[in-house]
Image: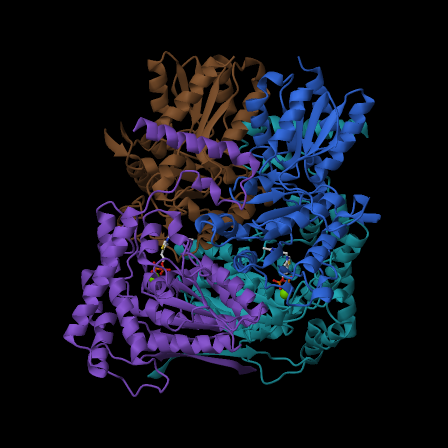
Chain colours: A purple, B cyan, C blue, D brown
Amino acid sequence: MRERIAQFEVERIGFLNASGQLLEELPDDIADLETIKQGYRLMVLTRLFDARAINLQRTGQLGTFPSSLGQEAVTIGFALAMQKNDRLLPSYREHGALLCRGVTLCEQLLYWGGDERGSDYQHARKDFPLAVPIATQCLHATGVATAVKLRGEPQAVVTVCGDGATSKGDFAEALNVAGVWQLPLLFIVTNNQWAISVPRAAQSHAETLAQKAIAAGIASVQVDGNDLLAMEYASRQALERARAGGGSFLIEAMTYRMGDHTTADDARRYRDDDEVSGHWQADPLARIRAYLVEHAGWKKADEETLQADCQAELEQAVADYLAVAPQPPEAMFDYLYAELPQAYAAQRQQVIDRRGQEVADE
Amino acid sequence: MRERIAQFEVERIGFLNASGQLLEELPDDIADLETIKQGYRLMVLTRLFDARAINLQRTGQLGTFPSSLGQEAVTIGFALAMQKNDRLLPSYREHGALLCRGVTLCEQLLYWGGDERGSDYQHARKDFPLAVPIATQCLHATGVATAVKLRGEPQAVVTVCGDGATSKGDFAEALNVAGVWQLPLLFIVTNNQWAISVPRAAQSHAETLAQKAIAAGIASVQVDGNDLLAMEYASRQALERARAGGGSFLIEAMTYRMGDHTTADDARRYRDDDEVSGHWQADPLARIRAYLVEHAGWKKADEETLQADCQAELEQAVADYLAVAPQPPEAMFDYLYAELPQAYAAQRQQVIDRRGQEVADE
Amino acid sequence: MSEITLIEAVALALQHAMEENPDVVVLGEDVAVNGGVFRASNGLYEQFGDERVMDTPLAENMIAGLAIGMAAEGLRPVAEFQFMGFIYPAMEQIVSHAARLRNRTRGRLNCPLVLRAPFGAGIHAPEHHSESTEALFAHIPGLRVVVPSSPARAYGLLLAAIADPDPVLFLEPKRIYRLVKEEFTPNREPLPLDVCFTLREGSNVTLVSWGASMVETLQAAEQLAAREVSAEVIDVATVSPLDMTTILESVAKTGRCVIVHEAARSGGIGAEIAAQIGEFCLLDLLAPVQRVTGYDTVVPLAKMEHLYLPQVENIVAAAINAVEFE
Amino acid sequence: MSEITLIEAVALALQHAMEENPDVVVLGEDVAVNGGVFRASNGLYEQFGDERVMDTPLAENMIAGLAIGMAAEGLRPVAEFQFMGFIYPAMEQIVSHAARLRNRTRGRLNCPLVLRAPFGAGIHAPEHHSESTEALFAHIPGLRVVVPSSPARAYGLLLAAIADPDPVLFLEPKRIYRLVKEEFTPNREPLPLDVCFTLREGSNVTLVSWGASMVETLQAAEQLAAREVSAEVIDVATVSPLDMTTILESVAKTGRCVIVHEAARSGGIGAEIAAQIGEFCLLDLLAPVQRVTGYDTVVPLAKMEHLYLPQVENIVAAAINAVEFE
Ligand SMILES: Cc1ncc(C[n+]2csc(CCOP(=O)(O)OP(=O)(O)O)c2C)c(N)n1
Ligand SMILES: Cc1ncc(C[n+]2csc(CCOP(=O)(O)OP(=O)(O)O)c2C)c(N)n1
Ligand SMILES: [Mg+2]
Ligand SMILES: [Mg+2]
């Protein structure tokens, strides 16, 4: 005897077409225009930042850097939906979300410039720093969400990873415990179609990545990640649900990595420029700008002011970054433990002396 | 706009009710009665073996031992469906499947008695030994299946793990690569409702474990694991499909761990005896015996002969086991590498001398 | 005052820490209703409920990651790994996150967690249940590795580990979980981390060990005394970071040292101790530092386990060798 | 004969091994079309196709488990880990399976695989891209750990690792991937495993190192020569199991030893080498064995990386110390 005992489906949400036109009437509780403008501003700033960071890297003033070009609506969309006291556990490509959370451009440059102080966020004290080891942050997020839940805080937690990351066991383990413990946790999968050179299709045979949530018995949806309205809306709904005790949620945000994986990568080795160009049609910035032009009277002058403001803010941040004095060498030891064990005191002195010697030699 | 973009369902298969009566007409290609009788014999032998092994452990003649009481139809069901040249990568509770694959009772006792030679299977040379670290065998199985596929062998691979094991990332990673590489690989999840003291419901919020396959885009089904006919049938279909290039499959076999987790466990600490007794209603042995009585003219005399034969075979195996001479102490070194590196030669000599000293002291 | 076993001492420390500090939570496989497979968390679930004593799904990597997230939020998670042989799935979380979160964020986030695991051979358990790979963790900056060798030290050191603001791997010598009993008052006082304990004073040779091997090491000292060799016995206790001061002072006095550990010899913590003695005490040494250790093999299954473990006579022989060296 | 970089030598060895033996397959993240993030498998996908050069999904634990399954079936998988800092998810598979399959089955199944990983600091990469945790793996019986320090040795040792019937962790010093060039004929001949290479003979002090630090060690030997100190230079190459014979013979001759490694000092492989020198050469030693190493810290991010790495002058100073010791 064969009987059906369970049934599932995956839905997709999007409000704007590629030209920024409404696909249907917006829900009542769509983000207000002020929020969207704020989001657009952050998108513009993020795009400028990306380009500038690559430029700094090329000129030897920054380390390896991963551009988020083309993914701005994803990262800013979910971040707009977060409350200040929610927690973010990002991957390394979420510059826009970090900005939105109050992590300064200067802090972000410091980090990518190879200075640990860049992760000592002054305005997002409880957010996690970037996770480099893929998908590991998803597990930390379950712990943070457990703590939040145990304490009865009315907050939610957001963690972000890539399409490639969904192949790593950590992701499945995190979804699983989030499901069974009904944690207030939103998983954002930024499906930008590539994990360095490995295309989405070579990563999993699943038709959607949203359906990975089914394995954990949690709800999910696929969202047009280049549609800021949809990203903000879906994220906000999921977060409200989580804060109200409704449990975890997964959003697969469909987007495209327009740039190289990082400044150390050359994407032309493994994908056609044509494929990339095609995706410019779906540019999230142009799309939301068109929406603002049509629905919020966004003018050329507004745009020019915005661009100029962002450019100025960025240049100030770069200047601040370049002016930061180096850490003292013993910083290497000073944050390893709350109090440095006696066993390492001599080594600490050694690195101070060594630096002193270097300075004397110079 | 919200649209449905994917849809999934989970089915359940079973042919016999708890009393061994047919739920509906059997498919034409159901196992023939000889196979079922062979399976029943193995189930009886496995059950006797389990009891005897526990007894050996209690009397200090065997190490920690995990009983498979109640799960015989699962483990023998899928093993019956395998061809000799298929490969098995079992977990530690698959004594019945091992028997079916030609791993002798004596080898199994040797292993559980703490002698590595128990894993040097004489008749299943390419099957993997038991995996103790949970779910790790699922990954090995993907490698074995890849090798089989690369070489164009018309074989399939079976790997087995428990309900608890499905929470470990390895399981998800293995399913994922099996899906995307379309490997000839059958995953059996022996859902016996418990992972030591942790009940199935605390392990995952997924309604079924079969649906974990959806995350990897592979097909799956839930099977009444106490129904030998259904287990053999579902496994054979999945294996034929896999051998024909149809890719991977997952079977969630629903059963119940009737005994303690192992001889080191006391299940009364965490579950009611009542719960356990209830499950005797669904005893897989009684059920398939009832089927044989009704459909194959199985008589009391047949049963008595079978029991006596199995008992004799078991006692012979126990006698053989107890008579095995110990390994020489240097065996500790002799299988570590193909050739022992010079660096360890002195240590090897030391252990020989030490054993010599012990013998002299005795 | 009553006789307490090592495993009972662990359970008492967990209970007292949870009573003192509501942020202390216990998590792991089978730690709640079942009280842990060795009963280390016996009674905690009943006393503190499922919000503070959590059975997790079966995934060690997840357990570590979960604990890190909790710790960063200010909880004091104590996570149990059922056996040290099952801690490896958590390696990435331990090496790349637990040990680094404070350093990475310049102190903004930190990681006050304890990872407990029973370790060592000698209980006739199946494969992977006999590991002593403390050296893998001792090589990781930012982590502490603590190994008690008596009930009282298990109690006091576990309290200290839980109170410590940084991550601690707390390895419990399961061979002596019930073997060693001791009378002491569980007075809610931690013992100091990062220091060795000198268990016996002596003048001819220094015996250095930790964990279950302390039993054989102390017995060896007794036998040596009978042979007029006065052995100083040091329990390292915190195997990373090492308190070399205590060890070097002792060796400077005795001129001889035998290090005893159950772990494989090559690259064991004994190597680091011997290297530092060679570096800082060379001129005091009257004999080469010797190591009495497990072999560089996989721990054999039950039938040959006894041939793997360091025995009292090996320690005695090494000490006599050292004393007779010229 | 032509000038070959270390990374080119790796690629050549892979190519030649694949040409010689159809069982050799290459797998990992980005190894196929992209040719590996450092181009170690450049051209292999084009030459051998997707059946022998496989891009895997992103999961290191899976990569290791997959390779073990393949190896047990008689293939010769060479798996790439993109950086050593990302190998930890595979720890359970490496420790509990790769290193044990042969022993566990008394030789029935074995595990002829190679796990390649670039390692070490000094290229200004992000966090986790600068690891030198070879000691973690060197402590695991059943595994070999091999570290080349020149293009010719990378070529010959990788061929040997692939031909070896047991699992080998092959760690490539990425700082010198393109820094060191060498003329040699890639003649399809393996070099021996399990032996040190003496790169320079000398009589006053033995300098022992491996991997990228060989560059500074050889430079130090030059500078010492200018100061009339004759240094013997040994490249350990196979860091587990250790060829102590070569090292001990050298130290017996020179009476002094400086060990140089980039890894954190405590519990590094330098400790094992120093311990064995102390054990077997005590009376030959004219000075304490010294270790010039990375600090017991997380490798700092790019801006302070240079302060972490052992420098030529540190090695020279240690050698001079040793020579002047009394
Ligand atoms: C555990 C681990 N393995 C490998 C890497 C190297 N690596 C960095 S990014 C990346 C690809 C990630 O792809 P995806 O998850 O899709 O994120 P995206 O880069 O597209 O944002 C890889 C393999 C890593 N950082 N961590
Ligand atoms: C990696 C790992 N963690 C923990 C254990 C200890 N352990 C042995 S069996 C078991 C429960 C397994 O449950 P399940 O997968 O349902 O299999 P079952 O025992 O029910 O057959 C645990 C936690 C282990 N063997 N390996
Ligand atoms: Mg991606
Ligand atoms: Mg189970």
User: On screen, D72 above or below B48?
Assistant: above
Q: Which quarter shows the C terminus of chain B?
A: top right
Closer to us: B144 or D170: D170
Is B108 situated left or right of A67 in this image?
Answer: right
Report the residue at 39% width, 55% height from top: B150
Is D154 displayed left or right of C279 in the figure?
Answer: left
Q: Residue at x 53, y 30 (%)?
A: D271
Q: Vertically, is C296 above or below C254?
A: below
Quarter for ligand 2? bottom right
Q: Say whether residue B255 is visible.
A: yes
What residue is at 53 percent from the left and 46 percent from the top? A338
Tally of marks: 0
Quadrant of residue C223 in the image?
top right
Q: Where is residue C52 in the image (x, y as percent from the top left)?
A: 65, 64
Q: Eyeballing the image, is D60 above or below A331?
A: below
Residue D220, given in percent of the width and then of the height, sits at 36, 22
Along the line of sight, the residue nearer the viewer: D258 or A168? D258
**Going 49% across and 44% down the picture, which residue do you hit?**
A336
Outermost residue, left side: A300
Q: Give coordinates of residue D42: x percent, y percent.
A: 28, 46
The x and y percentages for residue D203 are 43, 12
